[in-house]
Amino acid sequence: MSIRHFLQFNDLSRDELDYIFERALWIKAQFKDYQQYWPLTDRTLVMIFEKASTRTRLSFEAGMQQLGGSAIYLNTRDSQLGRGEPVEDAAQVISRMSDIVMIRTFEQEIIERFAANSRVPVINGLTNEYHPCQILADILTFIEHRGPIQGKTVAWIGDSNNVCNTWLQAAEVLDFNVHVSTPPGYEVEQERAGLYGHAHYEEFADPMEAARGADLVTTDVWTSMGFEAENEERMRDFADWQVDADMMKVAAKDALFMHCLPAHRGEEVSADVIDGPHSVVWDEAENRLHVQKALLEFLLLGRINKA
Ligand code: CP
Ligand code: NVA
């Protein structure tokens, strides 16, 4: 079997994604029932972090252990990665000592160069451009609460960042719609988002109009990791792009609210929304674990017949 990477959302086909969601639900049910399931015994995941993380590290490390394997954490501060070793050399070495690699880094180009020199599958644990594992978890959460996402409308309010770009790719692969509202100057860049066209998203100047009738309203921090120098300017530019109770009122009656976390209450979302009845953020965070276990299994073992 040739190596499969998960560097951006559209690296997987709709059929493969449907399989992974179904598989994630089965793996989750086993886990909740305290059934031991160890398909990855003796397999090692290396996790490389060039940016901070709570959920991504925890879900990959716990997930790998729960599947019978082990995980090794490397970061730029205390490895040669922070001292200028070429990414191509690091990929050669790390992939000879492990079975699968997850990387959180800056430019997408870094992870692509790593993957081109890797003997094992590489997973994107967030880059400046994409966060594909997050959207796997978000869509799994949508499916659990509301059923298939096909034909539904997702409202993205705020920055056209890595999480937004990944929603837009997911809409193309899985056939749903995204209504995007960003402040002027922060619009979606189609090429950077890796999109084929404009058929699955629409841009709105007014965030209330983007949210109107949406089945899911979602947002993210105004300043992503790596963009801290722009923080003050962004605070001003994004002030009218907060998801609040009035915005949730114009969405569909049973609309869900999601946020990849960490969140800043009082900035991109009001406390009464993130802590209120529409919010499924804790299920969303938990589903990182279950869906990534299905992803690890798929990339290492391919499709499995249900046990
Ligand atoms: N949502 C997410 O990726 O969280 P962490 O930055 O904590 O990994
Ligand atoms: N857009 C955010 C997501 C954090 C999980 C960032 O890149 O910092």
Image (cartoon, grey):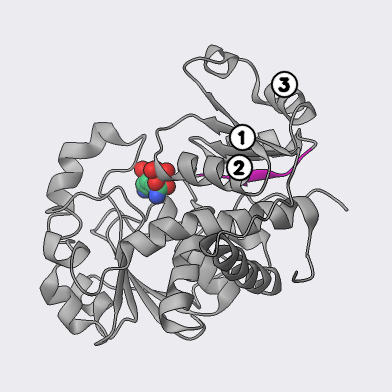
Between discs 3 and 1, the one toward the N terminus: 1
Q: Which of 5 and 293 lies nearest the eye of the viewer?
A: 293
Vertical placement of residue 68 versus 140, above or below: above
Amino acid tagged 3: Asp
Vertical placement of residue 29 versus 74, above or below: below
Give the number of the mark in front: 3 or 1: 1
Q: Which of 65 and 119 lies nearest the eye of the viewer?
A: 65
Residue 230, position as x, y percentages in the image: 24, 37
Q: Which residues are magenta?
A: 120-125
Give the number of the mark in front: 2 or 3: 2
How far apart, in angstroms, are the residues tagged by discs 2 and 1? 7 Å
Q: Are marks 3 and 1 in contact (CB under 8 Å)?
A: no
Q: In the image, is 99 to the left or to the right of 20?
A: right
Residue that numbered label 1 is attached to: 71
Residue 90, position as x, y percentages in the image: 68, 23
Mark 3 crowd level (few <14, some 14–19, many ≥20, 10 Å Cα): some
The secondary structure type at the circle numbered 2 is helix
